[in-house]
Image (cartoon, rainbow, N blue to C red):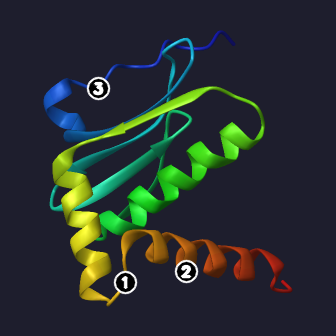
């Protein structure tokens, strides 16, 4: 059975874009939009998750960029001042700088990966 072409989603349904992760050819690898009072993280053309935490989704997208770079891939990550400010404020509200927030989240993710099933 032949594949149907994917239906494009009208721009007004996507949400307000705040971050884009692109490869050296400009292909979109991931991004963050704000929709219905939630941050929506997309990776590889799929919704990877939603959160009320700007810090959480930005940290995950920055981690994805770092992992790709560690594999030798050239990627460019750009994000809005609004997303950055919200993420940094959330970290500050927890008594952390954003770098420390990212480190804590990465450690939590690694611990979950190593936990027995």
Q: Which of marks 3 and 2 is in front?
A: 2
Residue assigned mark 3: 9
Q: Tag 1 or tag 2, which sits nearer the N-term?
A: 1
Q: What element carries label 1?
A: loop
Q: Where is residue 4 in the image (x, y as percent from the top left)?
A: 53, 14
Q: Which image quarter is the N terminus in?
A: top right
Mark 3 or 2, nearer chain start = 3
Residue 104 has which mark?
2
Q: Identify whether 101 is placed above or below 44.
A: below
Q: What element carries label 2?
A: helix
Q: How far apart are marks 2 and 1 (CA)?
A: 10 Å
Query: Residue 7 location, x and y as percent?
Result: 38, 19
Q: Which of 37 and 111 is in front in this view?
A: 111
* Position of 23 relative to 60 (above/below): above
Q: Dot 3 lies on which element? A: loop
Q: CA gap, disc 1 to disc 3? A: 38 Å
Residue in the image at 19% along x and 48% along y: 81
Is 111 positioned to the left or the right of 23 in the image?
Answer: right
- Which residue has dot 1 on it? 96
Q: Quadrant of the C terminus?
A: bottom right
Q: Are marks 2 and 1 in contact (CB under 8 Å)?
A: yes
Front residue of 10 and 108: 108
Find residue 103 and report its horizontal and vertical position in percent: 56, 74
Q: Residues within 10 Å of mark 3 (few under 14, many from 20)?
A: few
């Amino acid at each position: 059975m032949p594949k149907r072409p994917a239906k494009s989603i009208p721009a007004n349904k996507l949400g307000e874009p705040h971050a884009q992760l692109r490869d050296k050819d400009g292909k979109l690898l991931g991004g963050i939009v704000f929709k219905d009072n939630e941050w929506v993280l997309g990776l590889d053309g799929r919704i990877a998750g939603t959160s009320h935490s700007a810090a959480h989704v930005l940290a995950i997208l920055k981690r994805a960029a770092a992992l790709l770079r560690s594999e030798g891939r050239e990627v460019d990550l750009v994000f809005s001042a609004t997303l950055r400010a919200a993420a940094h404020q959330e970290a500050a509200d927890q008594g952390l700088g954003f770098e420390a927030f990212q480190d804590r989240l990465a450690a939590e993710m690694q611990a979950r990966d190593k936990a027995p099933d």
